[in-house]
């Protein structure tokens, strides 16, 4: 049992730490990113490569997330790597897959986000009540971004060996560093498969048309005013942007929905809305796991009833929320009601 991310993967997180893949993103197996050479010399990378070569990668403690998913018959990062990264020749150590976030620069403050991934959310935290910040275990931080010098070094050393690149955020289509990276990448490696995880609030079709093969994974967490509450952005503009992307011949569009207490009730309707539009390759779901946002807060009966309606959620298992989760959610909701100028409880989700 092997892992191509261990062999050829390269991940830089929004808070400027590195590892072979995004499933290894905290703890002793990540390290501050400095340079390509520093990355390639890390003991954790060498250990993972050896474990993969010997076929026991899932015995490595860094790979707990993939073990968790594979034991539950879910798609793991290791599984994804077998599909998107070519098999390396013996002794070959090329970096073929880059998963990168240039920083936390973002134009939205989504209710389920965090300061590590959004500069606007980071600013919003200054106005949050202390009981909410302490309950979430979060505080404001210094906004962070990868330097132009480090971006140049990445492209100069491995730009032409990359088979695929995935850009995360922050918001890549808003971040000038991401645009700088893409402008250089298209000259160095025009055939690279490019995926951008984006909120799709800003669409530059002329810029995107430079690439031959782009997948846009649009982060969209609902429809109509439910979306507007969660994301703080005009749904009509977002919807129009998705239409523009669908019409582009070089672009494949996917939707990713972060499912939380705020939108769980309309998950089936959200899936139908985007699938019925036509031109959307797939609609994927991921669960918000923070206690104050988790969909488990809707209650066991409602959770089971809605989960059974669509294949993506049929395998989701009910878990009892943390003791203070409901109380923390109410504080969370009160804050966002004020910030959005909306009353969440007045939104009639049943009409969808």
Image: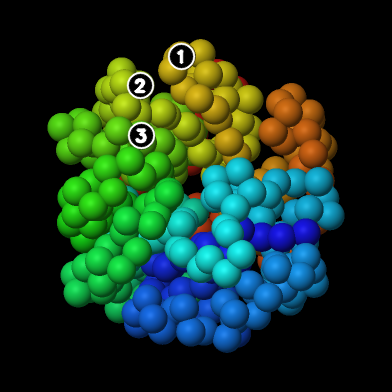
Task: Left or right? Give the position of 237 relative to 76.
Answer: left
Rendered location of residue 270, percent (x, y): 54, 26
Q: Marks 1 and 2: in contact by CB < 8 Å?
A: yes
Disc 2 versus disc 3: distance between alpha carbons?
13 Å
Residue at image mark 3:
213
Disc 2 versus disc 1: distance between alpha carbons?
8 Å
- At a point 46% along the width and 74% down the height, the residue shown is 18
- At a point 23% along the width and 57% down the height, the residue shown is 181
Residue at image mark 1:
278
Q: Quadrant of the N terminus?
A: bottom right
Q: In this rendering, which labeled residue sits more in front, label 2 or label 3?
A: 3
Looking at the rendering, which quadrant does residue 302 occupy?
top right
Rendered location of residue 348, percent (x, y): 53, 27
Q: Is residue 240 visible?
A: no
Q: In what element is the residue under mark 3?
A: loop
- At a point 75% along the width and 46% down the height, the residue shown is 74
Q: Marks 3 and 2: in contact by CB < 8 Å?
A: no
Disc 3 versus disc 1: distance between alpha carbons?
19 Å
| Earlier residue among tags 3 and 1 | 3
Looking at the rendering, which quadrant does residue 316 occupy?
top right
């Amino acid at each position: 049992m092997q892992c191509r991310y261990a062999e050829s993967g390269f991940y830089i997180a929004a808070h400027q730490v590195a590892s072979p893949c995004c499933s290894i993103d905290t703890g002793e197996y990540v390290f501050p990113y400095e340079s390509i050479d520093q990355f390639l010399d890390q003991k954790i990378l060498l250990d993972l490569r050896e474990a993969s070569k010997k076929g026991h990668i899932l015995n490595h403690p860094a790979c707990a997330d993939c073990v968790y998913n594979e034991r539950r018959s879910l798609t793991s990062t290791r599984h994804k790597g077998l599909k998107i990264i070519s098999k390396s020749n013996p002794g070959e150590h090329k970096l073929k897959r880059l998963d990168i976030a240039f920083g936390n620069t973002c134009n939205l403050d989504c209710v389920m986000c965090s300061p590590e991934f959004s500069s606007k959310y980071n600013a919003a935290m200054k106005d949050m009540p202390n009981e909410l910040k302490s309950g979430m275990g979060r505080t404001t931080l210094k906004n962070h971004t990868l330097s132009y010098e480090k971006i140049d070094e990445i492209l100069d050393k491995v730009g032409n060996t990359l088979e695929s690149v995935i850009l995360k955020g922050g918001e890549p289509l808003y971040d000038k560093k991401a645009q700088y990276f893409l402008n250089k990448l298209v000259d160095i490696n025009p055939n690279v498969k490019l995926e951008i995880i984006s909120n799709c609030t800003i669409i530059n079709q002329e810029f995107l048309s430079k690439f031959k093969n782009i997948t846009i994974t649009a982060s969209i967490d609902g429809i109509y005013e439910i979306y507007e509450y969660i994301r703080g952005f005009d749904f009509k503009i977002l919807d129009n942007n998705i239409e523009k992307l669908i019409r582009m011949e070089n672009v494949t569009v996917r939707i990713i929905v972060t499912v939380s207490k705020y939108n769980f009730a309309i998950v089936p309707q959200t899936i139908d809305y985007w699938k019925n539009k036509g031109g959307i390759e797939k609609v994927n779901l991921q669960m918000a796991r923070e206690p104050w946002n988790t969909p488990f807060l809707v209650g066991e009966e409602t959770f089971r009833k809605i989960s059974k309606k669509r294949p993506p959620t049929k395998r989701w298992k009910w878990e009892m929320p943390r003791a203070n989760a409901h109380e923390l959610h109410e504080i969370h909701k009160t804050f966002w009601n004020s910030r959005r100028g909306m009353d969440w409880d007045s939104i009639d989700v049943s009409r969808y």
